[in-house]
Image (cartoon, grey):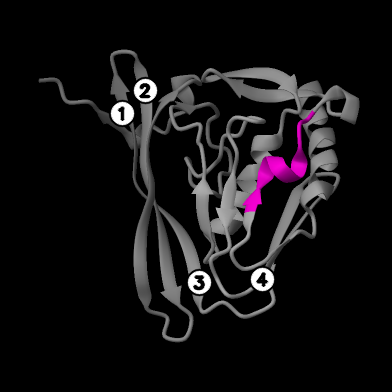
Amino acid sequence: MRLQDNKAVNLSLAAPKINGIIIKPQEVFSFWKLVGECTEAKGYKEGLVIKSGKVDKGIGGGMCQFSNLIHWMILHSPMTIIEHHRHNQIDMFPDYGRQIPFGTGTSIMYNYLDYQFINNTQQEFQLIVYTTDEYLCGELRSNKPIDYAYHIREENSYYEKKEDGYYRNNEIYRIIVDKKTGNEVKKELITKNNAKVLYDEQYIPPERIKMAHVS
């Protein structure tokens, strides 16, 4: 819990660095350019991080959660993601009230793995991000209406048992809908996940387990 509490402190320090930022047409957003290095001297504390595919602790833990929120908002916009990394090889925690499909997160590391997107539209966008006692909150605003609605959909989700353990599989799609007609105009495959489960198998829903074929 200490690491979780520290993560809340880290997020409260980083959020003001991005809150209110305006992304004009053709401008590129860079997470690390705005947030900068998370150091003890700046007040950041030790929190949960992912290192070499394992849960660990490190100064500034919690920044992936921050970039996860931004990524989720950008997926629901016409802007284009130009740098995105994922923890795509591991499934660390079982689902408890999950609302966002597994595998839609981000992985960032200062001066090495960034999260970037470009505003290749003709309108401005603004990011609003802030923390409360319980939540990290975000809004994406624009100075003009958006013609399309964006929906994220998970398909072909299942767990597969192999010799070295269980693996979680799914496909994530972005559905683009014309607001005027309600018609689907595009379906994009965002990613396919095949991640090793790191938690106890008792937390895997039995009805979603698919046995691997043995040749």
Question: Which segment is the magenta one?
Answer: 29-38
Disc 2 crowd rating (10 Å Cα; few below 14, some 14-19, many 20+) is many
The residue under label 3 is 149
Q: Amino acid at mark 1?
A: Glu
Q: Residue at x 69, y 77 (%)?
A: 143
The answer to whether residue 203 is left or right of residue 46 is left
Question: Mark 1 or 4 closer to N-term?
Answer: 4
Vertical order, 213 against 10 (above or below): above
**Residue 68 pos. (x, y %):** 61, 44
Residue 29 placement, left or right of 22: left
In the visual, does 125 lie left or right of 165? right
Q: Judge by depth and name the residue closer to the eye, 209 or 113.
A: 113
The residue indicated by pointer 4 is: 124
Q: Which residue is mark 1?
A: 160
Estimate how packed mark 1 is, as few (under 14), some (14 to 19) or many (20 or more) residues with alpha carbons within 10 Å. some
Upstream in the sequence, badge 2 or badge 4? 4
